Image: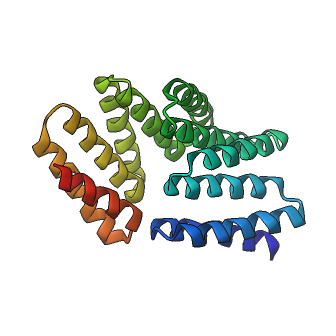
Amino acid sequence: QAQLKLEVYQRLGEVLNWQARYTEAMEIYNAMLSDAEQVGDVLAQSRALQSLATSLNYQGDNRASLERAIQAEALARSANEKLELAKALRMQGSARFRLGEAQSALALAEQSLAIMTELDNQNETARCMNLLAAVHYVSGRFNEADSYWEKALKLFQDLGNRHEGMDLLSNLGVVADGRGDYDTAFQRYDSALKISRETGYKDGEIVFLSNRGSE
């Protein structure tokens, strides 16, 4: 049952991240990486490293997150797996965005988006748009940011992905705040907060409470 065990590792880690139990999630992902190495599953190794990058991103250890994402990219390329490659590129873009490297993040997000569009993966396409919007926002291009975030939100809503959708509502609140429309920003943060509480998304609840308090 090695393959099933690797999948369970990944899903369990995701739930722990949602609950803001990052250290436990990383322990799970390290175990997943070790097991994947033992059975020689290159794709599972790439996924484990991407997942570790995500946990490190949540913790704010962006350098370590970037390193894991680069390792994940190398493994995905060796396996010639486009989906995992695109995910690793987006994860690198997220880390570089948080490190203040906007142009590098933009290039990585665009590369990832091109692959996801080719694969017609709507969920991952929306995630790439989310990152692109964030880069445009910090670069002062509010209209472009608003457009990408609106498109991404619609995709997530059409897919029934409430978890990603609430993050987009919060991001749209950031745009409204940047424009001085604090009432709209407050409403968007409040809507995201309600969904986070309904779904048990503790990491999001921390962020949305903070943002709503600022408004």
Which residue is found at the position 50% from the left and 47% from the top? 123
Q: Quadrant of residue 8?
A: bottom right
Which residue is found at the position 36% from the left and 69% from the top? 199
**Which is more toward the observer, 178 or 144?**
178
**Which is more toward the observer, 170 or 212?**
212
Q: Is residue 163 left or right of residue 72?
A: left
**Residue 135 pos. (x, y %):** 43, 30
Q: Is residue 193 above or below residue 130?
A: below
Q: Residue furthest left?
A: 183
**Which is more toward the observer, 179 or 5?**
179
Q: Is residue 211 above or below residue 7?
A: above
**Residue 115 pos. (x, y %):** 63, 33
Which residue is found at the position 37% from the left and 60% from the top? 204
Q: Is residue 38 left or right of residue 192?
A: right
Q: Is residue 22 left or right of residue 197?
A: right
**Residue 78 pos. (x, y %):** 84, 41
In the rendered view, how is the structure colored? rainbow
Which residue is found at the position 81% from the left and 73% from the top? 2
**Residue 14 pos. (x, y %):** 55, 65
Q: How many marks?
A: 0
Looking at the rendering, in which quadrant would you find the N terminus?
bottom right
Q: Residue furthest bottom?
A: 1
